[in-house]
Amino acid sequence: KKIYVNSDKSLSIRAILLASQAVGVSKIYNLLESEDVINAIKALKKLGIKIIKKKNFFEIYGKGLNGYSPKKKETIYAGNSGTFGRLILSALIKTNANVKIIGDKSLSKRDFYRIIEPLRKFGANIKSKNNCLPINIEGSKFLRPIKYIEKLGSAQCKSAVMIAALNTPGIT
């Protein structure tokens, strides 16, 4: 099915992230080609996702849930994107590698606690000083569903929990 949406950084990052978790080829038109979105594309390529820019769209070759293939100790650069930095942690909740998420100076000062807390409840192994970047995540094969209530209305927190729940057995 085709969905038409205006270019938007947040939606563009979510679109490529979800396409990377789907099985098969997704075509994304009107992707915002901002610095943050390009950093997200580079990061997904480091995780083994094939992404090709065509004339007026991008092809994302998704490998399914937990389909990333990072090196044993991979470093992912999120740039200044809090959206990508937080959501990629959720997508890595079941990975069998140790992945370090880093960001620019500004992103490295921002608090990630509201993402770290639910991901730890799911069962992910996360290490961070002061709940800021850099953050190391090593997924777990022993994930469990959680009950989550978002009190502050954060779309990033809700999206992170939904993405983590995709890799988790049971009902979250």
Image (cartoon, grey):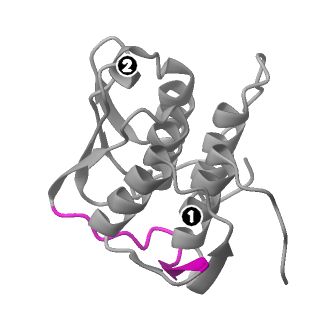
First to last magenta residue range: 56-71
Q: Which residue is mark 2?
A: 106
Q: Position of residue 125 (x, y in %)?
A: 34, 38
Q: Is residue 142 something that shows in the picture?
A: yes
Q: Amino acid at mark 1?
A: Ile
Label 1 Cα crowd, 10 Å radius (few <14 / some 14-19 / many 20+): many
In the depicted structure, whether residue 51 falls above or below residue 107: below
Tell me which amino acid carries mark 2.
Ser
* Element at label 1: helix
Give the residue furthest to the front: 55
- The image quadrant that residue 42 belongs to is bottom left
Q: CA distance from mark 2 to mark 1?
A: 23 Å
Counting from the top left corner in percent of width and height, residue 152 is at 76, 16
Marks 1 and 2: in contact by CB < 8 Å? no
Numbered circle sitting on residue 67: none
Q: Is residue 112 above or below residue 36?
A: above
Q: Residue furthest bottom?
A: 24
Residue 45 image offset from top left, x and y in percent: 33, 68
Horizontal side of residue 39 vs 74, given as left or right: right
Does residue 92 appear in the picture of this structure? no
Residue at the disc numbered 1: 16
112 shown above or below 167: above
Residue 62 sits inside the magenta stretch: yes
Where 99 falls versus 3 (above or below)?
A: above
Please report the residue visible at 84 percent of the width from the left and 69 percent of the height from the top. 4
